[in-house]
Amino acid sequence: MKDSLRTVLYPGTFDPVTNGHVDVVRRAVRLFDRVIVAVGSNTAKAPVFTVAERMAHLRLVCRDLPGVSVASFGGLLTDALHDFGAVAVIRGLRAVSDFEYEFQMALMNRELAAECETVFLMPSPGFSFVSSTMIREIGRLGGDIGAFVPPEICPQVRERFAGAGS
């Protein structure tokens, strides 16, 4: 019965999507019936890839994961939670340094919408240091990002940085 499916929302900018992001999606698939990976528009960030490009990357790297779909949203996360019919939000925690920010965000979201639950998932240890910010910096400086982004999108990510010039 479709109404009984437990849906979770995994929001982020995913600029670019990393192996750590994919690892968190794989973990979420084991816990929920549906996982919606939602590309958010963050006015505080200047993305390298457009929302459409990031969604295309996510669709490509998540294509074989059952119950995963990709969408975008703007505005409040709590509104997106309702719009997508999700019962919870997934947030990845790489290190203790992520916890304070994510904890504050989870509490604020719950204040805005009492039913907004947040589930924290940790990536595999091999991905605990990987962030999109670091990948963008390595890419801009001409470093090898191959170990940090999914192989399906690595050529596109490399090309974007090569075209940007250091």
Image (cartoon, rainbow, N blue to C red):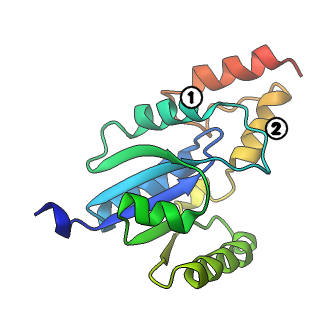
The amino acid beneath tag 2 is Glu
Q: Nearer the viewer, residue 10 or 121?
A: 10
Q: CA–CA distance between discs 1 and 2?
A: 19 Å
Whether residue 79 sits left or right of residue 70 in the image: it is right
The amino acid beneath tag 1 is Glu
Above or below, 2 against 54 in this view is: below
Instruction: Give the quarter of the image for residue 111.
Output: bottom right
- Residue at the (48%, 77%) spot, across then down: 116
Farthest right residue in view: 166
Q: Nearer the viewer, residue 15 or 52?
A: 52
Q: Nearer the viewer, residue 82 or 116?
A: 82
- The answer, for residue 91, to whether it is visible in the render is no
- Residue at the (34%, 36%) spot, across then down: 63
- The answer, for residue 150, to whether it is visible in the render is yes
Residue 96 horizontal/vertical position (percent): 71, 75
Around disc 1, counting alpha carbons within 10 Å, would you say few (fewer than 14), some (14 to 19), or many (20 or more)?
Answer: some
Farthest left residue in view: 1
Of discs 1 and 2, which sits in the foreground? Answer: 1
Around disc 2, counting alpha carbons within 10 Å, would you say few (fewer than 14), some (14 to 19), or many (20 or more)?
Answer: some
- Residue at the (59%, 37%) spot, across then down: 149
Residue 15 horizontal/vertical position (percent): 66, 40
Q: What residue is shown with label 2?
A: 137
Residue 120 horizontal/vertical position (percent): 52, 73
Residue 7 horizontal/vertical position (percent): 32, 63
Above or below, 58 against 80 in this view is: above
In the rendered image, which quarter contains the C terminus?
Answer: top right
Helix, strand or loop under label 1: helix
First reached walking from the N terminus: tag 1 or tag 2: 1
Q: What residue is shown with label 1?
A: 53
Residue 17: assigned label: none
